[in-house]
Amino acid sequence: MKILIVEDEPKTGDYLRKGLLEAGFVVDLARDGLDGLHLALTGDYDLIVLDVMLPSLDGWGVLKTVRRSGHEMPVLFLTARDGVEDRVRGLELGADDYLVKPFAFSELLARVRTLLKRGRSQEADTLRAADLELDLLRRRVSRAGTRIDLTAKEFALLELLLRRQGQVLPRSLIASQVWDMNFDSDTNVIDVAVRRLRAKVDEPFELKLIHTVRGMGYVLEIPEGP
Ligand code: CA
């Protein structure tokens, strides 16, 4: 597994490179945005760890160009402050996860491993959460073995939530991915669709999987503990 780190702070960059090398990854380190972009487009990486504040081209610029060029590798971005706007912007531009500095290396390593695993499982034919299954080939959804009929939009919405399991998805992101609408569109459409989806997927069952995160959006996750 080959990882690219784009980080201009020498200490952080060296520390991340050393840690990931010791964890058994092949690692390249770029110290500014343009070098990082060049490597990202040519280096065939399995994952990118991308700092946001970078000289010559910031992390947003790198991420945007990487996604526009059709590269689908997971991107974990590093942000200096715990700002909602930063997180939303990163996820909208196609990042897969983020970490707020300062973070423990063990935390970064756990995220990296999860993203690499998720990257592979996306090629599977079935997406799962608890007893919920979405069969991409047959376009069928079931829970605890019981078939659930969904409209095409509901199916697309559930697919997105399952692929991004555990991540809070802003309405604007859902709008752009499922409805092809832009940021300013009427997001009430999304709330209505989520409500309908929940009525089919969650209401008849004890374990609720789709959750509202106030002021942020929606997340599909298996609730912790009893
Ligand atoms: Ca920086």
Image (cartoon, rainbow, N blue to C red):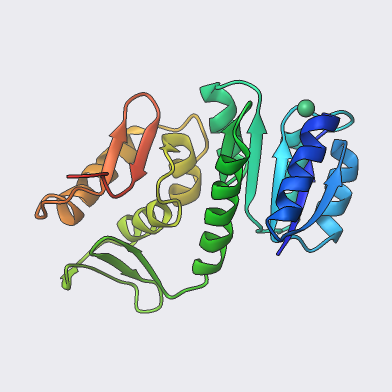
Residue 72: image x %, image y %? 65, 59
- The answer to whether 86 appears left or right of 65 in the picture is left
From what the image shows, is residue 35 above or below residue 71?
A: above
Q: Quadrant of ligand 1?
A: top right
The quarter of the picture where the N terminus appears is bottom right
Residue 183 visible in this rendered orientation of the protein: yes
- The answer to whether 8 appears left or right of 153 in the picture is right
From what the image shows, is residue 70 above or below residue 137?
A: above
Task: Give the residue drawn at x 47%, y 74%.
Answer: 124
Q: Picture quarter containing residue 87?
A: top right
Residue 26: image x %, image y %? 78, 60
Task: Give the residue drawn at x 45%, y 33%.
Answer: 185
Task: Give the residue drawn at x 34%, y 40%.
Answer: 190
Which sits in the foreground, 31 or 124?
Answer: 31
The quarter of the picture where the C terminus appears is top left
Q: Picture quarter containing residue 130?
A: bottom left
Residue 167: image x %, image y %? 44, 43
